[in-house]
């Protein structure tokens, strides 16, 4: 398909939260203790509960040359306004040909784990609700049909988390981010019945639990002095581990309507994974006690998991082995893996041999179905939603690459550097 004719919904982008996020959403009694942005050594950082959270450079490099990528903290002045301003984000989306986008959080952590560390759980719950109201009503609500709303979970209380699922679902939100491994954060694992109220709520409300790599706070690393390239290469391992954990847990068997998305984990490994779980089931179920009721694990996987990719030529070739109804596309704006603003051209080249009906599932139809999301509101049609039509709307919007003289040579960046910056 010609890139200008694509319709694109990205199920994994990111928002760099604006300093005004909590101004109109947090109850007055918590305002002084809510997260806030302060200036520290010329940088803008979020502070909450004694923690200082800088915006790491790789989180917001859209519009910067690759030689300036790095983990050094940045200020709002150093990043594109589209990272944190919704009106500018829509302009960037139009210029990049994106009809709609789902945005994971930044400073709270992908699963909201920073907020969960607060000892005052009433404060933490107020912050979670305020964040979700901002994201649904303001970030997504300002431009209906352009942002798939996503909520933060209440990690420390399964019952409260279930209540929040039902609250945000009533506001039209059908995606909640969640950790890839609650055990690493000190909570009961996927194999416990602790989370049953949450599993029931998301099943009842048709809410997808979107599990982003790194959301457990622990990435696959080999050594503290390993180059950053090692960690970046191994990132999909986290998502593979989460998929295995959930597949063999009691969750899917007890809650047959539950749905998960494996966000930013790629898809090329999925066919091997499906072969492996089927082989494991065949060889070991009689002594491990696994029972999928006459179905193969690979069949059950396709009923419950959405897989997602940014750039994955192998995954596209193996799309039928993965399942055409189980694949969605990601842009990853404004992170360092993102092909914005040339994502349509990259995707079109990778999918040159894919029939239009199959490509439409991958680029937008699966996202609409899984997330109960309709971008065609307010009179927008498919014809006015294509890459070409959206770029026409964005005529004159500047998407040029601009050097800012910041960043660090990737060859000099190690995992120890990342840890030092994250706690600075």
Image: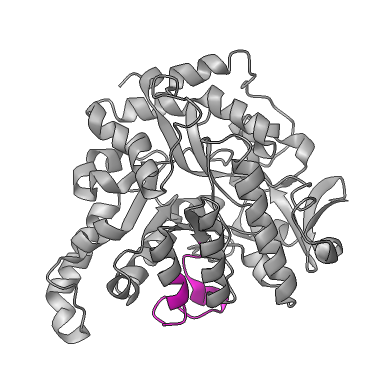
Residue 353: image location, x then y, percent: 23, 27
Q: Is residue 4 left or right of residue 186?
A: left
Whether residue 337 appears in this view of the structure is no
Residue 21: image location, x then y, percent: 74, 49
Q: Tell me which segment is drawn in magenta.
A: 178-199
Whether residue 159 appears in this view of the structure is yes
Q: How is the image coloured?
A: one colour
Q: Residue at x 12, y 70 (%)?
A: 294
Q: Residue at x 31, y 70 (%)?
A: 252
Quarter the C terminus occupies: bottom right
Q: Is residue 195 magenta?
A: yes
Nearer-the-camera pick, 180 or 61? 180
Q: Is residue 219 left or right of residue 237?
A: right
Relative to 180, say whether 22 is above or below: above
> Residue extending furthest bottom?
287
Nearer-the-camera pick, 410 or 47? 47
Relative to 284, say whether 226 is above or below: above
Relative to 110, say whether 325 is above or below: above
Q: Within the image, what quadrant is residue 202 found in?
A: bottom left
Q: Is residue 129 magenta?
A: no
Relative to 181, say whether 287 is above or below: below
Q: Residue at x 74, y 45 (%)?
A: 18
Nearer-the-camera pick, 101 or 26? 26
Q: Residue at x 23, y 48 (%)?
A: 323
């Amino acid at each position: 398909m010609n890139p200008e004719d694509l319709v694109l919904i990205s199920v994994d982008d990111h928002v760099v939260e604006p300093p005004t996020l909590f101004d109109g959403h947090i109850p007055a009694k918590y305002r002084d203790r809510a997260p806030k942005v302060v200036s520290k050594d010329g940088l803008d950082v979020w502070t909450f509960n004694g923690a200082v959270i800088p915006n790491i450079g790789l989180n917001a490099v859209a519009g910067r040359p690759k030689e300036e990528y790095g983990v050094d903290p940045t200020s709002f002045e150093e990043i594109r306004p589209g990272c944190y301003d919704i009106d500018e984000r829509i302009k960037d989306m139009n210029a990049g040909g994106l009809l709609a986008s789902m945005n994971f959080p930044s400073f709270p952590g992908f699963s909201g784990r920073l907020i969960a560390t607060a000892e005052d759980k009433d404060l933490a719950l107020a912050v979670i609700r305020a964040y979700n109201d901002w994201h649904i009503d303001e970030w997504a609500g300002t431009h209906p049909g352009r942002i798939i709303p996503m909520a933060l979970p209440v990690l420390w209380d399964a019952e409260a988390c279930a209540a929040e699922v039902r609250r945000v679902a009533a506001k039209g939100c059908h995606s909640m981010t969640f950790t890839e491994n609650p055990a690493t954060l000190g909570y009961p694992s996927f194999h416990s019945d602790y989370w049953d109220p949450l599993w029931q709520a998301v099943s009842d409300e048709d809410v997808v639990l979107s599990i982003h790599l790194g959301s457990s706070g622990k990435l696959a690393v080999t050594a503290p002095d390993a180059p950053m390239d090692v960690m970046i290469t191994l990132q999909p391992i986290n998502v593979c581990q989460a998929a295995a954990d959930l597949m063999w847990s009691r969750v899917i068997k007890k809650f047959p309507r539950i749905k998960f998305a494996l966000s930013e984990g790629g898809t090329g490994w999925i066919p091997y994974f499906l072969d492996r779980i089927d082989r494991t089931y065949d060889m070991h179920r009689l002594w491990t006690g696994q029972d999928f009721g006459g179905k193969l694990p690979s069949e059950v996987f396709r009923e419950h998991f959405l897989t997602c990719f940014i750039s994955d030529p192998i995954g596209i070739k193996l799309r039928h082995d993965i399942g055409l109804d189980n694949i969605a596309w990601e842009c990853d704006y404004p992170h360092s893996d993102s092909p914005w603003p040339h994502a349509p051209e990259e995707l079109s080249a990778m999918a040159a041999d894919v029939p239009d009906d199959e490509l439409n599932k991958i680029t937008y139809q699966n996202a609409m179905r899984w997330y109960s999301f309709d971008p065609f509101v307010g009179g927008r049609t498919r014809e006015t939603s294509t890459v070409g039509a959206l770029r026409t709307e964005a005529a004159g919007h500047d998407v040029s690459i601009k050097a800012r003289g910041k960043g660090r040579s990737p060859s000099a960046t190690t995992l120890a550097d990342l840890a030092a910056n994250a706690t600075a």
